[in-house]
Image: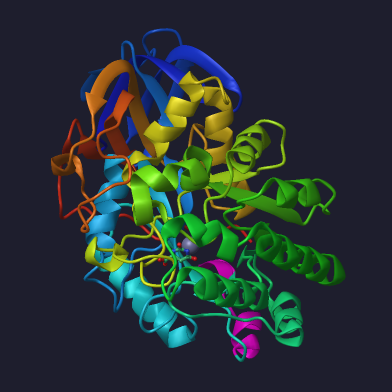
Amino acid sequence: MHFRTEIRNVTIVNEGRTFLGSLLIDDDRIDRITEGEVCDLRTPADKVIDGTGCFLLPGIIDTHVHFRDPGLTRKGDFFSESKAAAAGGVTTVFDMPNCVPQTTTAEAFREKWKIASSKSVVNFGICFGATQSNASELSRLDRRKVAAVKLFMGSSTGNMLVDDEADLLTVFEQSRLPIIAHCEDSTIIAENLKAAKKTYGPDPAIIHHPEIRSEEACLRSTELALKLAKQTGARLHVAHLSTAVELELLRSAGENVTAEACVGHLLFSSEDYARFGTRIKVNPAIKSPADRDALRKGLTDGSIFSVATDHAPHTLADKVGGCVGAASGMPIIQFSLLSMLSLVDAGVLDIAQLVKLMCHHPADLFSIENRGYLREGYMADLVLVRPHVAWTLTPNKIQSNCNWSPLEGQTFRWKVERTFCNGFPIYNRGHITDEKYRGRPVCFAR
Ligand code: DOR
Ligand code: ZN
């Protein structure tokens, strides 16, 4: 028995086009897309959803999250954070390896896979972490199963630093998968920190974070990553770009190199430290208003290829202190699509560009099978959003385990109405509909 749902009279955004139409879901797949109000069906659908006034987009694919399983689950876990994803219209996530134990061996990868399969309410991919000594593992990774290789060229939560140039070259040579690189030069950071401690004391206030994790630290490391990509031909995706100078550099990079911007770096600038304090402390640091504006511009001029969140939940207790004491990272996945829609309202990009950056391009870059587009025969990963509704974010609406958001108190003008994951209506107007539903591992056509 097939179950068919028609979403009718909705504004569909897909592959550069925005048009009024209807979409028919048949079990877990998109069966039909028609322009005009009603799908012309031989047999009526089992359920009809009136999409009048709403926009229908492919489910968001967030290729950079830290869901903290296993080992750091007091901050969040695959269940809590995937519910936040579903509530935010995100239907696929790529989880990063800086958990405990780190996802840097075949065994740890299998374990993470098992955990995600048993806890995640959205689809998932798992990234394998590069270390100074696991090169032989990298060359043996199953290209259809492993999402990407994550490489920390700068240290952050989890201490997974690889910074010796010979070791880095080995990683670039051995990886047959896209490398998602965190680029910050650790020597420059260490020097800056030493100087800052001398001037400001042992735990400098958060406003000094971009002086310590500086523009230069980002630039030098990104330069090195680009050099290694050129030398080896490896597929490099530079994670969470935070400066205008790196963007400039990327413009002349080869076709095997792309860049990611994260929502936090697009929303905030150094002027916001006074208001938000360590809540917006992330690595790489949020930098100047000019850097933020350059990143925003990069969304539409082709220099930023995809937008992710770097969703990194920490408890508020972990966020106490300054540049040394406070943990880096913020929970944001539940509000990433809505935040990007605010940028659409502000004229930074249009909604078709948003879909390209958050759905199509992540699917293309990692060769995700049958997802990321609204196409007949593709999996029915969808999000229905409603414009022109004003609502204010209060903690009771937060799904993340840590129960805070840097966006608390903000008024949004869009709402996620429903999220469908593999055709299943996992989120409906404020509620996860079935906490027992489980997403699927995504497959890679490589
Ligand atoms: O701010 C960050 N937080 N940057 C990272 O690279 C890691 C992340 C985390 O896992 O907390
Ligand atoms: Zn990250």
Residue drawn at 86 percent across, 71 percent down: 231
Q: Nearer the viewer, residue 285 or 160?
A: 285
On the picture, is 301 further left or further right than 292? right
Give the quadrant of residue 8: top left
Asked whether residue 139 is drawn in magenta, I would say yes
On the picture, is 431 further left or further right than 73? left
Q: Nearer the viewer, residue 307 or 425?
A: 307
**Residue 145 appears in the figure:** no
Asked whether residue 277 is drawn in magenta, I would say no
Give the quadrant of residue 81: bottom left
**Residue 109 appears in the figure:** yes
Q: Is residue 1 above or below residue 139?
A: above
- The number of callouts visible is 0
Q: Position of residue 394 (x, y in %)?
A: 18, 37
Q: Position of residue 122 (x, y in %)?
A: 32, 52
Q: Residue furthest front?
A: 199
Q: Position of residue 152 (x, y in %)?
A: 58, 73
Q: Is residue 37 above or below residue 358?
A: above
For the C terminus, the quadrant is bottom right
Give the quadrant of residue 5: top left
The residue stretch that appears in magenta: 134-150
Q: Nearer the viewer, residue 391 or 151?
A: 391
Residue drawn at 58 percent across, 25 percent down: 349
Q: Is residue 198 above or below residue 305?
A: below
